[in-house]
């Protein structure tokens, strides 16, 4: 019997429900996958994805990071994830000092306070890890840092969800998604005007005051569009990622209760568990790049001018990089290969330290809140989104 | 061979200091200091580890 033809369709129901089988086949059968219908490439092996992430001169971010954007004729909105050096370097340097592991400690009390608030309101018999907990709390942290007034912080999250959602088969934005993008832009535009008039101690005010070199080397201020783009990115990347990571976390600990027991026995293992969660089933599946020139990776050559999926979630399951790659093991040797769950190189996650801290504090509190629990498997719902994966609903019952 | 750090890329993650604190030190202002930039047979393996594991790709080894 011959195997079914290998088709990687990142907008199919089958892929949304289980990307890992298709990733395995791609790594084995087509490491330099080419899709003639949509005219894109996809890299799935660890060595190839790692090499492409390092080679930002060939694999450009300037056309966007999803297929519709990269293939589209319009340049993407101004945002650091859609930039190459030197522009990328200037923009990133404006905020990166606020996200170092040391600097992020200033957010610890806020994170603890929010986590305790949402867990204190939770019903142990009827608790949804995502809806009641990991959806609401991360967006509060990042939008507070950005300078979004409290009454709008949850709204930011709903706009992001609407914007990223994809029905099976849908590549671009839906009408609701477009509207959410417009509403987000208008909201941040108005907020920037307020902060221009009255600066506060927040990131939007800092971006307003900042200067970067222009093409001639003269210093210039950022315009409204650039600041809005940055704020939109922070609210998205800094929120829905941890939301999804926590949902998958509690599903995977239910699947592998011996690993949960390890944490119950020894909380010093929490940081290692966070790393393994990011490797085993992190929220980010891929980013798309565009080849500015002929690009060389260990598995071969990609011509210039092509969209290329860098499948980080597949690379993290590559058995040539990680021993027993499909085994969830919080005690694994982390030095074996680079964990690509938070990216690698110039575009590696700006908020990595915040994501790690939020996830670790959330785990500490969930170990107290639900030391024994069952997932209500029939109630699990996956999101259908591009770039990221995870659950929108993870209902659990806390056992006494 | 010498250790070279691109300070424009470094974002003070401190992975390198965790691997070999004799060479890399992050101060309490988030500035990275290269305490000893000579790559020797004794420290080469650890320095190469730091180069590989730096999430920012900010460290390299250069010929004298």
Image (tube, rainbow, N blue to C red):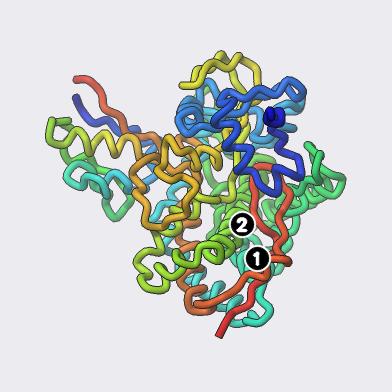
**Which residue is pictured at 65% across the width and 17% down the height?**
A305
| Relative image position of residue A153 (x, y in whole percent) | 67, 63
* Label 2 sits on residue: A244
Viewer-nearest residue: A372 or B63: A372
| Relative image position of residue B16 (x, y in whole percent) | 29, 44
Q: Secondary structure at mark 1?
A: helix
Q: Residues within 10 Å of mark 2 (few under 14, many from 20)?
A: many
Vertical position of residue A336 compared to residue A112: above or below: above
Viewer-nearest residue: B61 or A371: A371
Residue at the limit of the structure toward the right, as seen here? A175
Quadrant where the C terminus of chain A is found in the figure: bottom right
A236 lies left or right of A339: right
A60 lies left or right of A40: left
A247 lies left or right of B9: right
Viewer-nearest residue: A386 or A79: A386
Viewer-nearest residue: A200 or A61: A61
**Which residue is pictured at 60% across the width and 33% down the height?**
A25
**Which residue is pictured at 23% across the width and 31% down the height?**
B3
* Label 1 sits on residue: A130
Label 2 or label 1, whichever comes before in sequence order = 1
> Decide: marks 2, 1 in contact (CB < 8 A)?
yes
């Amino acid at each position: 019997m011959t195997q079914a033809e290998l088709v990687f369709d990142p907008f199919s129901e089958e892929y949304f429900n289980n990307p890992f089988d298709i990733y395995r086949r791609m790594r084995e059968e087509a490491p330099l996958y080419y899709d003639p219908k949509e005219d894109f490439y996809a890299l799935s092996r660890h060595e190839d994805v790692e090499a492409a992430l390092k080679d930002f001169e060939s694999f450009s971010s300037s056309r966007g990071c999803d297929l519709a954007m990269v293939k589209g004729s319009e340049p993407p909105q101004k945002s650091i994830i859609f930039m190459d050096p030197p522009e990328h370097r200037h923009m990133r340097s404006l905020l990166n000092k606020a996200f170092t592991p040391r600097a992020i400690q200033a957010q610890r009390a806020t994170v603890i306070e929010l986590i305790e608030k949402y867990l204190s309101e939770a019903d142990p018999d009827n608790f949804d890890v995502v809806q009641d907990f990991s959806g609401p709390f991360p967006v509060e942290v990042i939008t507070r840092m950005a300078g979004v007034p409290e009454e709008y912080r949850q709204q930011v999250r709903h706009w992001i969800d609407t914007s990223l959602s994809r029905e099976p088969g849908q590549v671009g934005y839906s009408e609701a998604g477009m509207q959410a993008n417009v509403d987000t832009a208008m909201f941040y535009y108005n907020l920037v005007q307020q902060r221009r008039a009255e600066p506060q101690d927040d990131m939007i005010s800092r971006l307003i005051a900042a200067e970067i070199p222009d093409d001639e080397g003269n210093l210039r201020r950022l315009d409204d569009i650039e600041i809005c783009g940055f704020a939109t990115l922070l609210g998205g990347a800094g929120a829905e990622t941890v939301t999804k990571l926590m949902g998958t976390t509690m599903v995977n600990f239910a699947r592998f209760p011996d690993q949960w027991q390890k944490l119950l026995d020894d909380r010093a293992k929490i940081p290692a568990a966070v790393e393994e969660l990011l490797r085993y089933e992190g929220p980010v599946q891929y980013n798309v790049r565009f080849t500015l020139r002929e690009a060389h990776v260990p598995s071969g050559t990609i011509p210039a001018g092509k969209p290329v999926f860098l499948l980080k979630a597949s690379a993290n399951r590559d058995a040539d990089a990680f021993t027993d790659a499909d085994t969830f093991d919080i005690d694994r040797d982390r030095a074996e290969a680079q964990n690509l769950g938070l990216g690698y190189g110039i575009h590696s996650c700006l908020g990595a330290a915040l994501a790690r801290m939020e996830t670790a504090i959330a785990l500490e509190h969930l170990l107290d809140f639900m030391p024994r629990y069952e997932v209500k498997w029939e109630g699990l719902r996956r999101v259908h989104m591009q770039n990221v994966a995870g659950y929108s609903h993870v209902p659990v019952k806390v056992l006494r | 061979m010498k250790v070279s750090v691109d300070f424009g890329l470094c974002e003070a993650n401190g992975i390198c200091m965790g691997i070999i604190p004799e060479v890399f030190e992050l101060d309490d202002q988030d500035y990275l200091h290269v305490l000893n930039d000579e790559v020797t047979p004794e420290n080469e393996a650890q320095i190469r580890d730091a180069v590989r594991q730096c999430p920012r790709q900010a460290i390299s080894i250069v010929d004298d």
